[in-house]
Amino acid sequence: SQKIEQNSEALNIQEGKTATLTCNYTNYSPAYLQWYRQDPGRGPVFLLLIRENEKEKRKERLKVTFDTTLKQSLFHITASQPADSATYLCALENTGFQKLVFGTGTRLLVSP
Amino acid sequence: GAGVSQTPSNKVTEKGKYVELRCDPISGHTALYWYRQSLGQGPEFLIYFQGTGAADDSGLPNDRFFAVRPEGSVSTLKIQRTERGDSAMYLCASSSFLGETQYFGPGTRLLVL
């Protein structure tokens, strides 16, 4: 069966450290993968998109990697801040289908 | 407007009633998507439009759910004979073209009593 898995347990880290979130998928052939941030009661906010032929993408303190062999994407936030505390969702677009399929999200808590 | 807007932000209704949820996409975006999100879950696809036509409605849970986009811009999600299990956050997103980044609105929180 098709699955997208993100760590359901909250990730607690200290301010200034690097947060690393994992997204694994099974039985999908994604054309691209996206990461979103979601605050409680709000809609997801787009952060980064990485395509199947890209290994890594960066934007300011954010970095995403995409390994189609391992079927995994890693999302990194360097020099984390308490304001980075939120739920982070990964979503993929299965090649040939236009809709996004989301993981359940991982909650990140950054302590001062 | 600058982003996707959705109205109302909250809707409380009684079981069996009819509701309409509205989405205003980013100006010029041709693709529009509806998702539903339950607490603790990721958004789940319902339907998407390319222009005025529903290109894929495979995520609509049953025939009580229907969506329209008559002029290729604003879309309305319609739910008939609401049930308590319909309670969720309903999210709308738009993209400039199919397959491009989807930008989400703030959502409509629906509560069916």
Image (cartoon, rainbow, N blue to C red):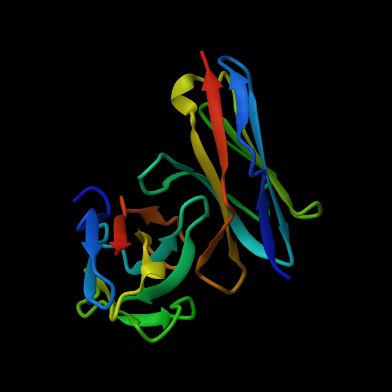
Q: Is residue B18 above or below residue B44?
A: below
Q: How many labels does the image show?
A: 0
Between B58 and A79, the one lying in front of the other is B58
- Give the percent coordinates (x, y) of residue B73: 23, 69
- The spot of residue B57 in percent (x, y) is 43, 80
Q: In this view, does B101 lie above or below A95?
A: above
- Left or right for B63, reference B41: left
Tell me if A100 is positioned left or right of B5 in this view: right
Residues B47 and A41: in front is A41
Q: Residue B75 is drawn in which quadrant? A: bottom left
Q: Which residue is drawn at 25% across and 75% down?
A: B72
| Depth order, front residue of A95/A39 | A39
Q: Is residue B77 visible?
A: yes
Please name the residue shown 49% across and 64% down the image. B44
Q: Position of residue B58 (x, y in %)?
A: 49, 80
Q: In which quarter of the image is residue B74?
A: bottom left
Q: Where is residue B25 in the image (x, y as percent from the top left)?
A: 26, 61
Which image quadrant is residue B84 in? bottom left
Give me the residue at 81% from left, 54% from top: A69
A54 or A94, nearer to the observer: A94
Name the residue located 35 percent from the left edge and 83 percent from the top edge. B64
In the orientation shown, which residue stands out farthest toward the right?
Answer: A69
- Assign the N terminus of chain A to one quadrant of the image: bottom right
Is residue B14 toward the left or the right of residue A86 in the image? Answer: left
Is residue B73 visible to the viewer in this orientation of the structure? no
Indicate left or right for B101 with B65 as reference: right
